[in-house]
Structure formats: structure tokens, C-alpha cells
């Protein structure tokens, strides 16, 4: 089963859900605002994604700007970044898709196509 962590009002999330549905891929939706990723989940997911913790931040979000995260990142350790990400789901790049050891943050159709096709 695919876990889709997102926000229904997010255009990118809606586009990603439509993409999954068009391919007949079932998923479990989890609202990132109401049930944000925990520190333990992020510690598991980030290495599986192949991305750095800094790449898991939603750089276009209001929370990112309000907290001045851009200026703080260069002085933060990976542990500090993961701790901050776990405090507010709106800081996390969305959607996050988790499926059988594969984790993707953000929707890039060509990447999803490659990684999910390998699962079939």
C-alpha cells in the first residue's frame, strides 16, 4: 500500500493524487497538517529518499518564510533539521509518498513514474 502524506488544498498534492488515480494506484491519504510526520518517520524516510534533510523543507510555504528557515539551515545539523521538520507538517515538502522502501518528497511525474514502475 502507498502512503500519501499531503494537504488537500495543495495544488501539487491534488495533481499527484489525480496522477496516482489515473494509473489505478491505491493509496492511503494522511493529512500533513493534522498528522505531520514524526521525527522517527523522518529519520527513516529521509535516507530512503536519497535526499538530504534540507531538501525535505517546503521552501515555498508560509511557515518556512515566517520562521526564517532559509537563513537558519546553513548553521543547522541534520538532527536539528529533522527535529524542526517534525514540529510542523507545513514545513515538509509535499506530498511525501512512501511505498515499500521508496520515499519521494514533492511530485515530479518522471521520478514517480520511474520509481513506481519499478515496484510493479
Image (spheres, rainbow, N blue to C red):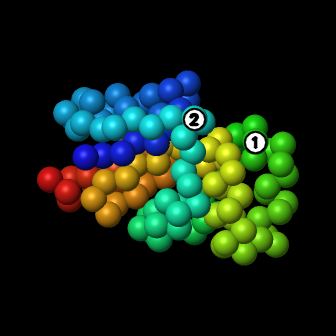
Camera-nearest residue between 35 and 1: 35
Q: Residue at x 53, y 67 (%)?
A: 43
Q: Position of residue 93 (x, y in %)?
A: 58, 48
Q: Earlier in the sequence, mark 2 or mark 1?
A: 2
Say left or right for 21 vs 38: left
Would you name the residue on which mark 2 appears?
34
Q: Position of residue 78 (x, y in %)?
A: 66, 73
> Which-is-in-front pick, marks 2 and 1?
2
Tell me which corner region of the image, top left, top right, bottom left or bottom right, holds residue 29: top left
User: In this view of the protein, can residue 14 be seen by the observer?
Assistant: yes
Q: Secondary structure at mark 2?
A: loop
Determine the CA span between mark 2 and mark 1: 15 Å
User: In this view of the protein, can residue 11 be seen by the observer?
Assistant: no
From this view, report whether residue 30 is shown above or below residue 104.
above
Tell me which corner region of the image, top left, top right, bottom left or bottom right, holds residue 21: top left
Say left or right for 41 vs 22: right
Q: Residue at x 67, y 72 (%)?
A: 79
Badge 2: few (under 14), some or many (20 or more) residues near its Cα, within 10 Å? few
Would you name the residue on which mark 1 appears?
63
Q: Position of residue 37 (x, y in %)?
A: 54, 51
Camera-nearest residue between 9 and 33: 33
Q: Secondary structure at mark 1?
A: helix
Say left or right for 61 vs 52: right
Q: Residue at x 71, y 58 (%)?
A: 84
From this view, report whether residue 28 is shown above or below residue 114.
above
From this view, report whether residue 86 is shown above or below residue 43.
above
Say left or right for 112 vs 61: left
Q: Position of residue 51 (x, y in %)?
A: 52, 66
Tell me which corner region of the image, top left, top right, bottom left or bottom right, holds residue 34: top right
Q: Residue at x 61, y 49 (%)?
A: 92
Query: For the view shown, which residue lies furthest in the left direction?
Result: 120
Q: Which mark is residue 15?
A: none
Amino acid at each position: 500500500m502507498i502512503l500519501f502524506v499531503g494537504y488537500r488544498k495543495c495544488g501539487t498534492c491534488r495533481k499527484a493524487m489525480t496522477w496516482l488515480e489515473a494509473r489505478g494506484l491505491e493509496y492511503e491519504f494522511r493529512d500533513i497538517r493534522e498528522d505531520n510526520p514524526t521525527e522517527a518517520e523522518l529519520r527513516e524516510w529521509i535516507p530512503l529518499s536519497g535526499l538530504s534533510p534540507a531538501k525535505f523543507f517546503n521552501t515555498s510555504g508560509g511557515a518556512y518564510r515566517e520562521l526564517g528557515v532559509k537563513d537558519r539551515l546553513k548553521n543547522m545539523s541534520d538532527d536539528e533539521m529533522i527535529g524542526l521538520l517534525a514540529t510542523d507538517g507545513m514545513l515538509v515538502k509535499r506530498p511525501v509518498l512512501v511505498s515499500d522502501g521508496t520515499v519521494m518528497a514533492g511530485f515530479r511525474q518522471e521520478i514517480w513514474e520511474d520509481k513506481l514502475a519499478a515496484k510493479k
